[in-house]
Amino acid sequence: MSFLPIYRSYDWKQIQTEIYSKTSADVERALSKTGKRSLEDFKALLSPAASGYLEQMAQESQRLTRKRFGKTIQLYIPLYLSNKCCNSCSYCGFNTGNPIKRVTLSMDEIMLEVDAIKAMGFEHLLLVTGETGPDIMDYLPDVLKMIKPYFCNVSMEVQPMEQNDYEKLIDAGLHGVYIYQETYGPRYAEYHPGGPKRVFEYRLLTPDRLGMAGIHKIGLGCLIGLDDWRTDSWFTAAHLSYLEKTYWKSRFSISFPRIRPAIGGFQPAIEIRDGELVQLICAYRLFNENVELSISTREQEDFRDHVIQLGATALSAGSKTNPGGYVVQPQGLDQFQVEDNRTPAEIAGVISAQGYEPVWKDWF
């Protein structure tokens, strides 16, 4: 069994039409539910009709988040290991066609970065690379074994792999994997014309391989700006529902990456306003009170400060999006521009000022 036949049973245009056809009555019906909300309810909460209910959604999102997670915000930081990539994703600064210097950190350079990250207080580390092919398995297990003693958990956002590769990485200390489909829509091929990532189905089934490998946490999401964000988010929720039922021993998270400026000058096809992104975050929380919701430094300071009380459970802080960005090579080679450049200590202070606890270390 896999998500593929479920995905194929849905029609993108039909789902999109149904979302945009929802009425105020549908939204009120979804909001009035006291038990678990369905994917049909999620359509209503995503719909334009729900924009007039944002305050009510925000209050319920806050209540459910505090019920499940308390008043805590997990802090994490990415460590970019390499900007080498064999894909030609039109929106990414690491696109193989972009004339940039390609860098892969050595083990000594990685430890310099680790020392800087540890000095900031982090215990949650996210390793990031471009897609470099099968040779990555000659590199990542050694990296994990070297740095795992310094962190309570290490996750990855790297290329899709086979189940046996994930099993090897789990044995080396891997805690979680974030794998974004980017878009579930018909424009996927347009944005991924070359490289292994052009194979939609292989990427779609990566969370299945992760679940079968027994990974502790799986992160999902779509890249907001490639296609209709409401429809893409509904498909992400459908994917999440399937995975939770099938791989119930794993935990799950949702991220909300908006396209940011990057080398190549890509312009998003679809814009999402801040109020709409708040609606999306709250809709996910009302749909699933157990899923972790992560907000990265792609977002501006004021927005991130605002969502601390609206459903977010994890924030990145102090992020650099280039290999060696903390010590080894602090300038240039960024995958994309960040918007929140505050220090981790400053962000922790903002969290505390709102009556929440910044969590640096979490063993679960």
Image (spheres, helix red, strand yellow):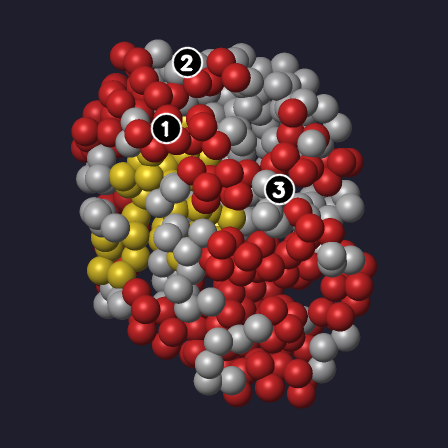
| Label 3 element class | helix
Q: Residue placed at 77% from the left, 75% from the top?
A: 21
Could you tell me residue 273's position as x and y percent?
Answer: 61, 60
In this picture, residue 285 sits left or right of residue 108: right
Residue 278 shows in this picture: no
- Which residue has dot 1 on it? 169
Could you tell me residue 315's position as x and y percent?
Answer: 37, 50
Classed neighbour count for the residue bearing mark 1: other residues with Cα under 10 Å, few (<14), some (14–19), many (≥20): many
- Which residue has dot 2 on it? 138
In this picture, residue 139 sits left or right of residue 246: left
Q: Please state which amino acid type lies under the numbered disc 2.
A: Asp
Q: Earlier in the sequence, mark 1 or mark 3?
A: 1
Specify the label residue 145 is tagged with: none
Specify the label residue 204 is tagged with: 3
Q: Residue placed at 30% from the left, 65% from the top?
A: 69
> Disc 1 to disc 3, how far (Cα)?
20 Å
Q: Please state which amino acid type lies under the numbered disc 3.
A: Leu
> Disc 3 to disc 2, how far (Cα)?
24 Å
Classed neighbour count for the residue bearing mark 3: other residues with Cα under 10 Å, few (<14), some (14–19), many (≥20): many
